[in-house]
Image (cartoon, rainbow, N blue to C red):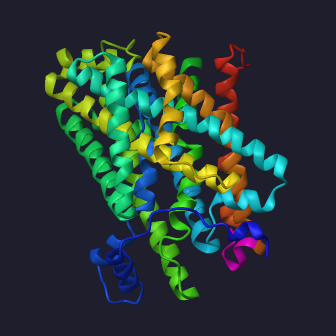
Amino acid sequence: MNPRRLQPMTRPPMTEGTVLAIHDALEGRRHGIAMLLPFVGPAVVVSIAYMDPGNFATNIQAGARYGYGLLWVVLLANLVAMLFQALSAKLGIVTGRNLAQLCRDHFPPPLVLLMWVICELAAMATDLAEFIGGALGLALLFHLPLLVGMALTAAITYFLLLSDKFGFRPMELTIGALVGLIAVCYLIELIIAPVHWPQVLGGMVTPRLPDREAVTIAVGIIGATIMPHALFLHSGLTQGRVPPRNEGERKKLLRFSGLEVAIALSIAGLVNMSMVIMAASAFHSGHRGVAEIETAYHTLTPVLGSAAAGIFLVSLLASGVSSSVVGTMAGQLVMQGFVGFHIPMWVRRLVTMIPSFIVIAMGVSATRALILSQVGLSLALPVPMLALLWFTCRRDIMGSYRNSPLVIVLAVLAALVVLGLNIMLLLQAAGVQILGL
């Protein structure tokens, strides 16, 4: 056996009550919703990556400029996300290892080191978007300087990270509550906004890209949706949550995990669609130039009222804080998996938030920084996507749970589409003219 497999991951344990509840469900002593609830957690935690401030920035631009016309892009991105998150969850359940650990076990050391460096840079880019988003929400909501908002966001995030001392279940419940808050905020926004539902349905099922700028925004939506750290984190959250005692339990865990992924990411997808719908309803008719989060907030007040603007900021704050917590967790897992290092969580939090303070202190627009961070993430995206495909297709690693031919075809096509669009995003960001656009 490879000695590196003997290095355990440092992870807060599940509470005893949660473990007992899961075993009761696996053994058939729970039914209905009581059977499903103990399994809810990993997909809910990673779903926050699909509602982070980077999504706010791209979705607002999509709705303001093109109305409901790019909703099909949000739907497509969410379906691809469901597939890859399900693969990540399956990898952890079947192997008892997370994606970063498997990369370390099976790839040569120079490649592992390179992958780790790329993932650490991606973690900084992710944290830039999430941290600034939370700070922006606080600054606008309470009329504070942005740097003060950033300091408060750092304190709130660190406080939430300390809850892992009580076991991982409280952290799951906390993140789940913030996800629920974001969803409720956008449900209220849809009630306030004058939505044209037939056009909404048409935008979801009619693929079209009116111009070159629409392509850029569409690629940005996909780039902001498939997040590298979420693919790494999901396998870590499922790898030892409750180890199956036999193959029957493993199959049940996979089934419950797939159901949780479908539900959690469906909610995340609906929230993203709601962002586009709200922006389309509020801005498309007379404020198509809205591109900044700050401008969206100030424009919402005269268009939909102060309540809508306030709810928008509350959702942005919840998104920034919760996604920043999840991003820090993912960064810690990636570091331990690739190179075996474990550092205190507060050190991890400090290191990843320093670039955010530097960017804002330099006077860079907060929304501009959010969008640039998504471009940076697209550079790292091939690492987890291709590694995840590689491992879940191997019989020596997955055994009878390796991907079926249909899943392989769908995953390869999805990866090619996403990677191709992200390359297009990078080329356009660099000013390269692409033929036909």
Q: At x 47% / y 30%, what residue is drawn? A: 129
**Hey, which quadrant is residue 194 in on the image?**
top left
- Give the image location of residue 133, x and y in percent: 39, 29
Q: At x 15% / y 22%, what residue is drawn? A: 306
Residue 417 located left or right of residue 360: right
Q: Which residues are magenta?
A: 397-403
Q: At x 77% / y 70%, what residue is drawn? A: 3
- Give the image location of residue 363, x and y in percent: 46, 9
- Give the image location of residue 352, x and y in percent: 53, 34
Residue 102 located left or right of residue 218: right
Q: Main secondary structure of the magenta part?
A: helix
Residue 399 sits inside the magenta stretch: yes
Q: Is residue 225 above or below residue 57?
A: below
Q: Tell me if I can see residue 80 in this picture.
A: no
Q: Is residue 146 above or below residue 397?
A: above
- Give the image location of residue 150, x and y in percent: 37, 26
Q: Tell me if I can see residue 272 in this picture.
A: yes
Quadrant of the image containing the N terminus: bottom right
Quadrant of the image containing the C terminus: top right
